[in-house]
Image (cartoon, rainbow, N blue to C red):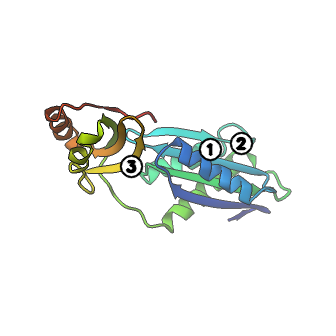
Amino acid sequence: MRERGSRFFAFVAPAIDADAAKRFVAEIARRFPDATHVCFAWRLGWPPAERAADSGEPAGTAGAPILQALRAAELTDTVAAVARYFGGTKLGKGGLARAYGGVVRAALAALPTRRERPRARLVVECDYERLGAVRRLLRAGEVDLVGERYAERAELTLAVALDARRALTETLAELGLAARAAPR
């Protein structure tokens, strides 16, 4: 998108956590090292944890409009980054906000989206003998495996539909296991 000589390029991607969102923004900054600014926003989890950064633009003129575009689209687990090349004419605070928000809205309109039920991320730690029983609790769209770590014990991170959380925790209790909230 062009606005009085400045060029704005929006990029949107799924992000499962803040580390994934940070890697995406860093990749955009690496791909466009000569951009005047690379501003971003993300919404992660449910209820959404949000972050926005103006990255050198006047306060509230870049990150906030990008974040508002993500909110208006009712997206979560999503990161958006905008690379701006200054075109020689200052746009003012209102012009910047309209340009940043507008380019992200246009990018979102061109992308497919998928509706999902709100989810919580839970961590289940278990002995290897119980690992198979925990894995049998996975059901696509309801209880999904999103991460795993293996050391003395197995640690599985699950994305659980909020309306299925109680049943899962009850079943885990029957197995002698508990789940804790995953760190964001």
Q: Residues within 10 Å of mark 2 (few under 14, many from 20)?
A: some
Quarter residue 155 falls in: top left
**Mark earlier in primary sequence (2, 3):** 2
- Marks 2 and 3, how far apart at CA: 31 Å
**Mark earlier in primary sequence (2, 1):** 2
Q: Position of residue 98 (x, y in %)?
A: 63, 53
Pointers 2 and 1 in contact (C-beta within 8 Å): yes
Residue at image coords 21%, 51%: 136
Residue at image coords 70%, 60%: 8
**Viewer-proximal residue among 64 and 143:** 143
Quarter residue 22 falls in: top right
**Viewer-proximal residue among 164 and 89:** 164
Residue 178's place in the image compared with 54, above or below, is: above
- Residue indicated by mark 1: 63
Q: Of the numbered discs in the image, which one, if any, rests on residue 146?
A: 3
Residue type indicated by callout 1:
Gly
Q: Position of residue 37 (x, y in %)?
A: 75, 50
- Marks 2 and 1, how far apart at CA: 8 Å
Residue 24's place in the image compared with 56, above or below, is: below
**Mark earlier in primary sequence (3, 1):** 1
Residue type indicated by callout 2:
Ser
Residue at image coords 75%, 41%: 56
Looking at the image, residue 27 sits to the left or right of residue 164; the answer is right
- Marks 3 and 1, how far apart at CA: 28 Å
- Residue indicated by mark 2: 55
Residue at image coords 31%, 51%: 144
Q: Position of residue 154 (x, y in %)?
A: 35, 39
Looking at the image, residue 79 sits to the left or right of residue 83; the answer is left
Mark 3 or mark 1: which is in front?
A: 3
The answer, for residue 97, to whether it is visible in the render is no
Pointers 3 and 1 in contact (C-beta within 8 Å): no
